[in-house]
Image (spheres, rainbow, N blue to C red):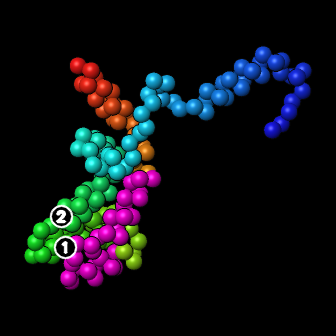
Amino acid sequence: MLQLPNAFFPKFALNKIKDLIKHAKGSRRPPNDHKPLPCLEDVLHNKVYLAAFHSYLQSEFSDENIEFWLACENFRASDSQDNLGWKARGIYQEFIQPAAWKEINVDQYIREEIKKSLEKPSLTCFDEAQKHVYLLMERDSCPRFLQSDAYLRLKQKSRTVFYI
């Protein structure tokens, strides 16, 4: 750390600067808010958070990842082998194929593997793409959501309802 002569910065000014730096590095959240932010897993498994997250992504015109993730969860819950074929083709056409209406960002290798699996789809045919999309949401979309006004309003609203 660079040491400047005291002649340039009187002792009381240095303490004020150190104090400002210490507080600037802290959280921007109010000091009475000690709850940690939910992680993506929490958001995806809480109906209220999930609805707010989906709505937030729609407002940013980037809801294809959450919709793909939900479609994969629905697909994996399929109880009939007969339904897998048409459900898998539907997911592929909507999210995977090049220039799809809600095309997700996955590499060519994953696209080709999914396309091959459509001949005889299994419950795991979208797993790699779903993992990839999950990581994208975890690193990008979810942190933005948790810092958004939409999340802060939801959190404030839940506190208000709790106290009423």
Asked if the stretch drawn in magenta spans residue 95, the answer is: no
Q: Which residue is mark 1?
A: 89
User: Nearer the observer, disc 2 or disc 1?
Assistant: 2
Q: From the top left corner, tell me how far across and down residue 39 is, in percent.
A: 39, 46
Quarter-of-image position of residue 49: top left
For the residue labelled by badge 1, is the local secondary structure a helix, a strand or a loop? helix
Disc number placed over residue 77 in the picture, else none: 2
User: For the residue marked with disc 1, what is the amino acid?
Assistant: Arg
Q: From the top left corner, tell me how far across and down residue 21 is, in percent.
A: 67, 29
Q: For this view, does 60 lie left or right of residue 94?
A: right
Q: What quarter of the picture does the N terminus occupy?
A: top right
Q: Are marks 2 and 1 in contact (CB under 8 Å)?
A: no
For the residue labelled by badge 2, is the local secondary structure a helix, a strand or a loop? loop
Q: For this view, does 110 lie left or right of residue 70?
A: right
Q: Residue at x 53, y 32 (%)?
A: 27
Foreground pick, 60 / 145: 145
Disc number placed over residue 153 in the picture, else none: none
Q: Residue at x 35, y 70 (%)?
A: 128
Q: From the top left corner, tell me how far across and down residue 28 is, in percent.
A: 51, 30
Asked if the stretch drawn in magenta spans residue 112, the answer is: yes
Q: What stretch of residues is rendered in magenta?
A: 111-139
